[in-house]
Amino acid sequence: MTNNDIIRKLRYILDYGDDQMMATFASAGKEVTRSEVSDWLKKDDDEQFAAINDENLAYFLNGVINNKRGKKEGPLPVAEKKLTNNLILKKLKIAYALTDTDILDLFTLVGLNVGKAELNALFRKPGHKHYRECHDQFLRNFIYGLDKKYGPKKA
């Protein structure tokens, strides 16, 4: 999944307009313009399309955490310069206050059977002997599960 795919899908799940997108970035300490947001959300084949880098996506994810959980006391968290799928998964887990059981239920919603040990390996620190890299398909299924459970309800 590209960063643009992730931000487009999260915008849909959260049902955010451009103003809410800009406010989400601002809550994490990053000012962005409506034009930047619009270009990040365009389809890849649009001539106005602009790729969102890891640092800006990290600001957005930190903003989502602030919006859903409230801001922590003290200084704002520093946005990572480099994101991995594991870190994106962790930030979304924090934002939605998900337990391991909640995450397993999300995977069940999309027809994926994941074990608790397999899931816990994704949240370990790199270098830990049981650390497991989160692949794109796994992250994609997790986001689809979020959409099914928390996305706007279809009429």
Image (cartoon, rainbow, N blue to C red):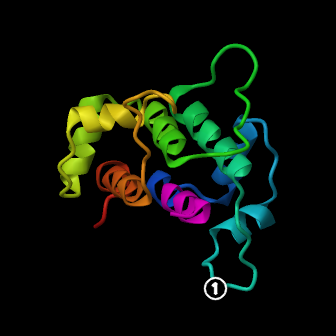
The part of the chain drawn in magenta is 1-10
27 left or right of 99 in image: right
Q: Residue drawn at (45%, 27%), measured in percent from left and top? A: 128
Question: Observer-nearest residue: 148 or 112?
Answer: 112
118 left or right of 129 in image: left
Q: Residues within 10 Å of mark 1 (few under 14, many from 20)?
A: few
- Three-letter code for the amino acid on which mark 1 is drawn: Asp
Vertical placement of 41 versus 26: above or below? below
Question: Observer-nearest residue: 57 or 130?
Answer: 130
58 left or right of 126 in image: right
Residue 7 lies in the magenta stretch: yes
In this figure, which residue is indicated by the disc labeled 1? 45
Q: Residue drawn at (31%, 37%), measured in percent from left and top? A: 119
> Outermost residue, top direction?
73
Q: Residue drawn at (44%, 58%), measured in percent from left and top? A: 136
- Residue 51, by quadrant, is bottom right
Vertical placement of 42 versus 59: above or below? below
- Residue 29, by quadrant, is top right
